[in-house]
Image: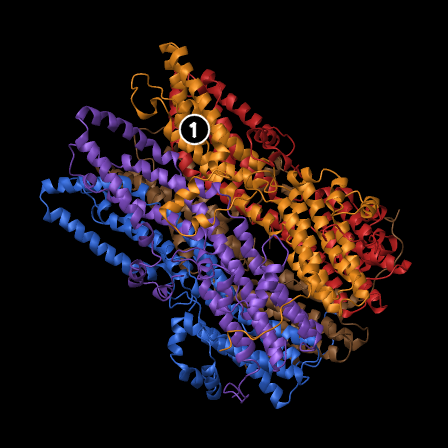
Chain colours: A orange, B purple, C blue, D red, E brown
């Protein structure tokens, strides 16, 4: 589920800042606490080993190793740069996916406005077109979102939910195409539209074209989602980033140890406070990237595909049937002084 | 209210710089002064404690702690990078929201040009379509802008303002859809358009289509606003940034203290001038980001939604009614030598 | 006036570099020389004070102050980062403004191609539509460009220039709309177009629609210009940047002094050459940003709005009247071997 | 073949990270292991030479050389910056190429919806249009993708595959145009579309136009692919980047040697662990750029052009023939409570 | 001429790297070698002066000067940042220019598909429209590309080449417009299109509109090219960048000298290898920017405008005449199993 916090930031103030800060769902705290705990456990294991398991001579040697690492680490792992640019690429992709997630309203308004008539078969045609579009969305979402897949594990579950009917499932199954079949319901919707056009329910070719363009736009959205799924960011890019961050903090297990056994009073003798905050900032930043990498997944912040499907079918049906041609009597308004 | 300063920067000069500098509304000074004061209070509290509450031995220890922090702080908190890239993402989003805020002029011009007639019922139809579009905008803005919500706290207030009429409110209420209903007035507008088309006030299908496309564009704008509200930047991203900045300046309370009690004459013995300016630059930069994060909020720089609603209804009505088909007698112009 | 230098850079060579370098109009030299001179005056004033007004003891103290500042200055003012990202945002905005500045050619070609006839009243209708569009541009430019405002300080000056006629000015004045009225001439143009359509000068609805779309596009350009003027980059952003740059170089007045009175031979004893170049680069970079911030202003590089208005009316009239339907006799071409 | 890993990142967790990490195909490991091995071989050759082939005096001199290099290397080669910005440019280009790779669905749906009839010659016309479009894609892909070139080394192989027929090959060959001929089959498709329009299979001009626009869009995609191939990123840009990275790591062969013969216990006496990781991060990042530079090539991550051709012909034919006008009987749906 | 190297990078491998590396045309080597040689000459002149013309005392002084410079240079000239962001702006502009360079295919296909008939006068009309569009391109290119200007130094040369005919030249000359006249041939093309529409060669208004839209798109491309030429990147921006790079390497002439006369064995005593490579990377990077700044110029990498003109006229004529309505007999294809 997406996590909304807009009201918390409606104006810039110190308290709004805290309201944003102390949210848990979708927060940076939630996404990193477990790894931070693990990291701290390892950190203290290294600390205990260093302080109690080694004799002074060994300590001296280990210290030398580590100081050598410490000096060169930041130079060798350009973390900030890599993360900053990677996040930019990922955010751009995330925006594009969201822009093509598929909202039914435009298509439904077109169908309602352009396919005229209240006879049962026309109403049914309008409803069916909407259903077919959402069905297509269900088919696509099943391939790219685990949550939707879990809701519709098989064809039966889609039939049960009402998006597909049994005789339709058979026809869908019979389509002989070894590739993705999400376009089949779009095809049906086009054919239904063509049928009502021939029957005169759409009064002119330009209007038929307008309605069809809306169906096409919806399909293009679905196709773009499939394509984003087909061609992800080249694997090596996230690999490089993710390994770099983890490698850096793995090395920090050693390089951020307080190695001087005598000077026991400096602040990081017991707790590496700066490193912990650095961990929060860099891991948090990377978690943002990880979370956005597959925005149709199961994170708190991922798009709510199931919600969208329900909203689309409900709103779509309301537009093409329940509220069809129902508009209030026109009365003079107040603005004409 | 947005803050305009274009005339002040119409040419590059030293004085224009000062004119921009010393504005208060929407300025960086206004957005940070309170936090700067709070920070300074804490800074002096730490200073007083360090100088007067500690004995020399404790001071020495504390000094060690702090110097250790000071050395590593900048390395651990990559503030510049994080802010720079975050602001870029936020500015992009802000631009998109503004581009879809919903201006009525195109739709109104289309309605006025394509729906013909001066009979009262045609005029009323044109006015009603405009009113429905702005009504839809009111419904959307109420959900995403606190200011508009405050102006229209309930349906009654919308009725009183004239955007909605009582019998319309009842129909709107009866629409059975558990989701956002901002599309209902758009639906009404489409139906009215369809009605005048059937009655022959729009003379050809392509023109009906052109008018309807404008209504659709306006609706798409509203839908995009809703979507930006539905799916914000993932919470963890601003959290990481905002915490990093605050954490950094919290640490500065200590690391920027003048710790050497003997050398009392260096410039920061009494006032941390550089740190104060650093505070201004970084906090100011972050405030820009905070302010842009929800541009429909209540900051000085946020979009003036209420103004836009009034402008839309006023301009829209002027276009479709008051100035309908009124154009000056055509006379030869001067440019034909 | 924009400054063109494309021919100077048509190929990459050392001499082309110099040709670009030594131009004055719109150059970095022109934009910064005055501030550089002022800065140098202050610099030498500080220098003289330090060297001659202070006794050695005071000098020592001041020296301590300044060295402390010097050490921390670069760390506290992340100039490069702030400028780089700010310039990116500004360049993007500048591009968008230019893309919507409003060229008449497409609309004029549409009007000439689609509104048919050589009868005087049709010719006048075509001319009038063009004039109304440019008039709308004049109205918009007056609000956002000081240069255009100076050319057309009041309605009379617009009437004198021929863009507006007296009886039109009266009607424009009578329009009851408390907001920007730049859309009124667009409204007139639409009405004229509608009139010639009804009179059969445009032969089919799709062609009427095509012509009207062009008028709409021109109006959308004007609306976008108004919006960019209405909602600038939030004030705090340029403030932070401009203050940071000035603050940095103010501090440099002190920190870049040659403080060692004995070692009189190092290069900056008499002239701070590196700092002067740094001043040129950073101030020059910032001046680019300042110049682009309001591209409709009065800098050398700003868009030539008055030129554009003249070009639009002249080209537009040539297209819809002088060259209307005049095309050469068609003869076989050479390319058919 | 593109490498898909979306399911592995559907939620952010520690284990998902490892799943992404340990993939081989398309991974950073696969792309750099060979160069890393070569680098290590040279590294140890330098090491052995230094430690055993030189006498202490020579070693001292060499050491001096190298330490001098070491100090200045990072300053002289701004690797991170160059790579970060170059990757940004390349990723943008890669996205554009993918967006124009050419999917047949929209065109096929348009042809199926707008060209009506089940008579054999109409079906054949629809099939032929689809085949011509994919044929055009084959011609373009042969020029820009080595894999497709290998599949279709000559015209005969295209004929054998069925995309082209023998009498068509002759006509294609006879076209007298010294430039790329990929547009010829598009021309044929347009002519076929025109023919069925004249025969009344498309019922109205707006619908003919709609169908033709889809053919045009497909052609524009192909043209953009050709243009990206015609005008690559200027050669000097990748050269600078690629040389910089290789030069840097060539220098590291020397500068990262452990030169102190006495202190044999520091961590890099036997294995330059940090440098190896730095190699992985920077080379990996550069390999991402190299891989994206020509996304139609033969890397693991490159677009699967042959797959796309097969999918297009198969899906296209299914849409315009097999499933033409076949839609399920409409029955009331469940959503009407 | 653009330099193509796609085949060299079709897969990522070590040898492909070398193939890209050792190309000369359009390479970084070609663009910087002359300046590198000049720089080295000056470098050795400074070296010789320092080592042989000065006495030890002077040397010591000079050394002091230079070391002072050396310490502060990198801090004062943020070369990497400035170049990186400037190149980003320039690459974006370069992409936009290329996207609007004007390809005739879409327009030609529209004319061929929509203007029907094989009568000589219809064929001539189609040919003439294409010729006029390319003529417009020639007029625009003459203004913005030195190469095209050289090919068409005057109107006579255009007439000789066949793009313009003598009687057309006279009419073009008579057009009374003090501004750019590239739109006149577009006007002619529109008028010819209008003529054939009136004569019934285009069968319906929507198709006439479709054809006209393509002509308009071609004109818009030309207009955008003119605008990019009219309003370049503000001069001060490239000036700042170009001066910064040159100033930096001018200073390096001194600061990178080996100043220590005793320690004659460090690597840069005779040859400043790191500085040379730094020169290559930074100058190479800047040359990329210089080359892209005016992509219609005469560099190896610049767009081949003359080639494009020839390709456009040749392909355009082939589409509207030679291959008009010639499509192969339709036969059943192999894909119908």
Pick the front one: B239 or E199:
B239
Which part of the image, by quadrant, shows the N terminus of chain D? Answer: top right
Q: Is residue E75 left or right of residue D206?
A: left
Q: Is residue B14 left or right of residue D91?
A: left
Q: Position of residue C177 (x, y in %)?
A: 46, 76
Residue sitting at x 39%, y 42%: A18
- Chain letter belonging to callout 1: A
Pick the front one: B43 or A147:
A147
Would you say residue E154 is visible in this rendering? no
Pick the front one: E205 or B184:
B184
Q: Which residue is mark 1?
A: A73
Residue sitting at x 41%, y 33%: A278
Q: Position of residue D102 (x, y in %)?
A: 70, 51
Q: Is residue C280 above or below residue E273?
A: below
Q: Could you tell me which secondary element the residue under label 1 belongs to? A: helix
Would you say residue D132 is visible in this rendering? yes
Q: Give residue C40's quadrant in the image.
A: bottom left
């Amino acid at each position: 589920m997406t996590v909304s916090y807009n009201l918390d930031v409606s104006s810039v103030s110190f308290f709004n800042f805290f309201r944003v800060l102390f949210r848990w769902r979708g927060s940076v705290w939630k996404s990193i606490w477990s790894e931070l705990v693990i990291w701290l456990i390892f950190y203290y294991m290294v600390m205990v080993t260093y302080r109690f398991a080694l004799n002074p001579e060994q300590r001296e040697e280990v210290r030398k190793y580590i100081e050598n690492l410490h000096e060169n680490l930041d130079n060798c792992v350009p973390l900030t740069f890599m993360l900053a640019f990677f996040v930019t690429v990922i955010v751009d992709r995330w925006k594009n996916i969201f822009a093509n997630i598929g909202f039914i309203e435009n298509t439904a308004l077109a169908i309602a406005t352009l396919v005229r008539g209240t006879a049962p078969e026309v109403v049914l045609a309008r409803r069916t077109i909407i259903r077919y579009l959402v069905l297509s969305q269900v088919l696509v979402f099943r391939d790219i979102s685990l949550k939707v897949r879990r809701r519709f594990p098989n064809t039966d579950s889609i039939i049960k939910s009402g998006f597909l009917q049994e005789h339709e499932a058979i026809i869908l199954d019979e389509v002989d195409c070894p590739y993705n079949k999400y376009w089949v319901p779009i095809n049906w919707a086009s054919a239904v539209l063509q049928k009502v056009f021939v029957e005169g329910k759409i009064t002119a070719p330009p209007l038929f074209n307008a309605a069809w363009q809306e169906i096409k736009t919806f399909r293009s959205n679905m196709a773009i989602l499939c394509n984003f799924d087909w061609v992800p960011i080249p694997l090596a890019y996230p690999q490089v980033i993710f390994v770099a961050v983890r490698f850096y903090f793995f090395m920090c297990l050693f390089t951020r140890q307080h190695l001087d056994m005598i000077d026991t009073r400096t602040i990081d003798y017991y707790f590496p406070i700066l490193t912990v905050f650095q961990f929060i900032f860099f891991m948090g930043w990377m978690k943002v990237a990880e979370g956005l990498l597959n925005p149709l997944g199961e994170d708190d912040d991922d798009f709510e595909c199931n919600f969208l499907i329900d909203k689309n079918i409900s709103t779509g049906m309301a537009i093409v049937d329940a509220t069809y041609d129902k508009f209030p009597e026109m009365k003079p308004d107040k603005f004409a002084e």
